[in-house]
Structure formats: C-alpha cells, structure tokens
C-alpha cells in the first residue's frame, strides 16, 4: 500500500495503522482521548462468524459487526451480487423520474416479505438514522395531507435509540446521546419504557406492560391527541439496554395509537430480518405498525442501506389531491444499486436458510448458558435476550441492583479480557451486548461462553 511518501507492504506489524488512527481518526460514541491512549481493534478480515485484526489475531465475532452482519462475513453470494452490479453500473439515482433495477427488485421483495404487515411502499436511505428520519417526516406529512396539520408531535420511549440526526436524536430517549447536543427539537416527548429489571412499580411483566401503556395513553390525552402525529419505538430496545417489553405491551400501544388516531412507527433497524427469532420484531408481538424502519440486517452491512416501509393505509394519503403531496425528501444514495443488490442477495440467504429460526433456536441455548454464568458470577445482575439479541447486565450489588457508573472500568475490562482471549464482545455502559450473526451455532455459543466466563473471572479479581 502506498500513501504519499509512506510505503507499506501489508498491514502486518500495524504500527502505521495504530499511530495514524490515533492521529487522524475520530470514532463514534467515544471520547477521542480513549483512542489516543489505547489503540482500537483494527479489523482487517472476516469469514463467517470470525474476524481477524491487523496483527493476525482471530476472534469469534459475538457482536456481528454492530448487530448488522446477520449472514456472516465474506459471503460469496453477497459479494458476487455487488460485483455483478458493479460491472453494469455502480451508481444511479432514484430521484424524480429515475430508477435502477436492484432498487426496484428490492422494493418488490420487501413488499412481498411485508405482506402480513400490509406495507404498500418503501423509501430507501443510507442507514438506520436515515430510515427513522424518513419515517418521522412522512408521518408529519401524512397528517398534513389528511388535513390535520396540527398533528405534529412525536412520542417515544425513554432509553430509546433511533439515531443521531437532530430529528431522530430528539426522539431518542437515552440522555447520554442527547446531553452534548441539546437543545434538541421542540415537539418530541418521551414516556417511561417497560423495563422489567429496573422499574419502580412491579416485577410482574404483564402488569408493567399495562402500567407503561397507561402512561403513554395518559400523556397523549394530556397533550391532546389532535396534536400528536406518531409514536415511535423499537420492538426491543437495543442500544438503550436490551430491554424486552412484556408481551402485552406492543398490542396495548397499537390499541392506544388506534384510539387516538396516531401513527405507530416500528424502528426495526436491529430487529428486522430475523434477529429476534421472528422475521420482524413487531411480528413476534403480533402487531402491525403503520411505518417500519430498517437498516443493518437488510444487507448485513455489506454496503450502507436503510429502508422505510409505509403501510397501505398511510400510503393512501398520497393519493389525495393536495398541494403538499410531493415527497420533498430523499438522499443521493436512496436506492443505491450496489447496496440494493447486496440486500437482494442477503435476503435470499435469510429466507433460504431460515435464519430467523436459527436465531431463535441458538438464542434460546445462548440464554440458557448465560443463566448458568449468572449463577457463577455475583457481578451479573441480569441476563436477558430474545433470539440472538442478548445482554449481560453487571451490578455492583445484586440486591440493590446498583449499576456500575458509566465510566467505571469493570464492564469495559470484561469486554477487553474477552477480546484478549479471542471472543469479540462489546460493553455499552454496564451491559455487555451479544448480537452475533444469525448463522451462529451452539458450538460457537460454547466458545463465547467460555471466553466470557474467563473474562469475568479475571476482571473480578
Ligand atoms: C434501533 C436503532 N435505530 C436506529 C439506529 C441508527 O442506525 P444507523 O447507525 O445506521 O444510523 C440504530 C443503530 O444502532 C438502532 O439500533
């Protein structure tokens, strides 16, 4: 590799990369000082469920990239689809009266996959934040087209993560993401999320589902349903702490949205395409949303892509004659041919190999093994998961559930120890997030558990 007057034969040794990373590169969700002190993992190769760093060390990738590489790394079918499209044309836009074959094929495929949910149209973007931003904008536009322009407010949940642009950040309820960028946008409100491990009301899941649904209901009534455009939530809160709602929660919020004539937006960026053991997170709760956002697993991250699906009911507003019916929204990379070609090949694999079913089966085994870890280690307050979306929550005291503060080293040390023994996991605050490829096997669960067990044992010393 040649860079100006710097010549590198390959990445081995890797000092060039480590030094220049510290010198030039800022990382998301990180204080830059951290990467100055400690070189990040520099990953240069992947195969299936394994990755290699620039020094040649091999790791079991229990993070699945960033809960997105659902079919695993370096899949021949996905690469070939990208190259085949590259040989035709790398890019053409989908603005106004342009389109391209992979985008059309993907829209057709998605509508077929989303038949149960009554979806009617899809708009593409470059990732999850984009997909949710599109969802929020279309929700507001919907009410203008329906001649109810005062319905503009967006409700969401505390601890939610919907992305980083100002709109979606304003809907994100996690304080840690908001603080440095406030003030955020007006008209966004968060209500309590149904967190069975940490809530002031009850240990009974169904009761909690009802309490949190009632809180949403009351807040909407308090503010006036005629002012509210939409409620957005993740079927399972991911970055906010892997919070799995009680099974009555989503059906209840669907009813509340219907009662108050409010759109329900499902942020399926993590849960879409099989991660929770069902093709879609909302499908597992038996609920149809009005708008659904996707990214990550849509093409396993081979090329950035996001998608927003709009139900037939919502779509019908655009059939009306209205001066505001043009969709004045979209990105240069909406419907990028390479990203869509990758998605078409990726979704073929997801369906052909029934990866949601594998995620459910292997996820159940993973959870069972995590429960055994909890019995061994006092620092584990809770383990939970659905499909291959799992978490370990560390506490300083099991009885009081006192969590480790954000900057306390223990959880990060566990993650680091695990990586040192060849198991790639990541901590988010005091929780370890586990989200491998949906192709994961029980043997790989055993390998992961062994590494995590060792990591906790040595961190606890
Ligand atoms: C539920 C959810 N929504 C939205 C996003 C934002 O996606 P992106 O980082 O692709 O913009 C994420 C990212 O992790 C997410 O987990």
Image (tube, rainbow, N blue to C red):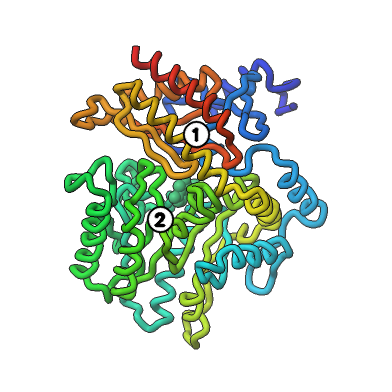
Residue for badge 1: 26
Outermost residue to the right: 87
Would you place residue 332 above or below residue 201 in this image? below
Does residue 109 appear to the left or right of 409 in the view shown? right
The reply to whether the residue tagged 2 has its Cβ within 8 angstroms of ligand 1 is yes
Judged by depth in the image, the label closer to the viewer, 1 or 2, is: 2
Q: Position of residue 340 (x, y in %)?
A: 67, 56
Report helix, strand or loop for mark 1.
loop
Would you place residue 264 above or below residue 455 in this image? below
For the residues labelled 1 and 2, the Cα–Cα distance comes to: 22 Å
Residue for badge 2: 168
Does residue 280 appear to the left or right of 412 in the view shown? right
For the residue carrying disc 2, how many other residues have a C-alpha within 10 Å: few (<14), some (14-19), or many (20+)?
Answer: many
Residue at screen point 28% across, 51% down? 193
Q: Position of residue 88 (x, y in %)?
A: 81, 56
Report helix, strand or loop for mark 2.
helix
Does residue 320 appear to the left or right of 207 in the view shown? right
Residue 242 badge: none
For the residue carrying disc 1, how many other residues have a C-alpha within 10 Å: few (<14), some (14-19), or many (20+)?
Answer: some
């Amino acid at each position: 590799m040649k860079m100006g007057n710097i010549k590198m034969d390959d990445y081995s040794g890797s000092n060039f990369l480590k030094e220049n990373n510290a010198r030039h590169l800022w990382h998301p969700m990180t204080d830059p000082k951290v990467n100055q002190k400690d070189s990040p993992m520099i990953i240069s190769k992947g195969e299936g469920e394994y990755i290699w760093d620039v020094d040649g060390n091999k790791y079991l990738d229990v993070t699945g990239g960033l809960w997105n590489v659902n079919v695993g790394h370096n899949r021949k079918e996905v690469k070939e689809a990208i190259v085949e499209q590259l040989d035709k044309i790398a890019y053409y836009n989908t603005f106004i009266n342009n389109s391209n074959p992979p985008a059309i094929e993907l829209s057709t495929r998605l509508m077929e996959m989303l038949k149960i949910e009554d979806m009617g149209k899809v708009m593409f973007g470059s990732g999850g934040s984009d997909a949710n931003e599109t969802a929020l904008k279309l929700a507001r536009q919907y009410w203008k087209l329906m001649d109810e322009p005062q319905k503009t407010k967006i409700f969401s949940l505390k601890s939610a993560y919907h992305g980083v642009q100002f709109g979606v950040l304003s809907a994100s309820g996690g304080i840690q993401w908001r603080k440095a960028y406030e003030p955020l946008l007006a008209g966004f409100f968060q209500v309590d999320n149904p967190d069975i491990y940490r809530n002031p009301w009850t240990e009974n899941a169904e009761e909690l589902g009802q309490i949190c649904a009632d809180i949403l209901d009351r807040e909407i009534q308090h503010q006036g349903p005629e002012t509210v455009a939409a409620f957005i939530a993740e079927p399972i809160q991911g970055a906010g702490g892997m919070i799995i709602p009680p099974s009555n929660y989503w059906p209840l919020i669907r009813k509340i949205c219907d009662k108050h004539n409010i759109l329900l937006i499902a942020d399926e960026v993590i849960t879409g395409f099989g991660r929770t053991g069902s093709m879609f997170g909302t499908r597992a709760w038996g609920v149809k949303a009005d708008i659904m956002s996707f990214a990550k697993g849509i093409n396993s991250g081979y090329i950035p892509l996001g998608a927003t699906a709009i139900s037939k009911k919502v779509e019908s507003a655009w059939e009306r004659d209205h001066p505001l019916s043009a969709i004045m929204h979209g990105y240069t990379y909406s419907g990028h041919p390479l990203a869509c070609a990758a998605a078409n090949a990726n979704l073929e694999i997801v369906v052909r190999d029934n990866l949601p079913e594998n995620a459910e089966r292997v996820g159940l085994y993973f959870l069972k093994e995590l429960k055994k870890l909890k019995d061994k280690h006092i620092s584990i307050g809770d383990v939970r998961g659905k499909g291959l979306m799992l978490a370990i929550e560390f506490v300083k005291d099991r009885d009081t559930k006192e969590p480790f503060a954000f900057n306390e080293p223990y959880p990060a040390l566990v993650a680091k120890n695990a990586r040192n023994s060849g198991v790639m996991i990541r901590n988010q605050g005091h929780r370890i997030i586990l989200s491998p490829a949906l192709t994961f096997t029980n043997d790989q669960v055993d390998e992961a558990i062994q590494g995590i067990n060792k990591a906790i044992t040595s961190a606890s010393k």
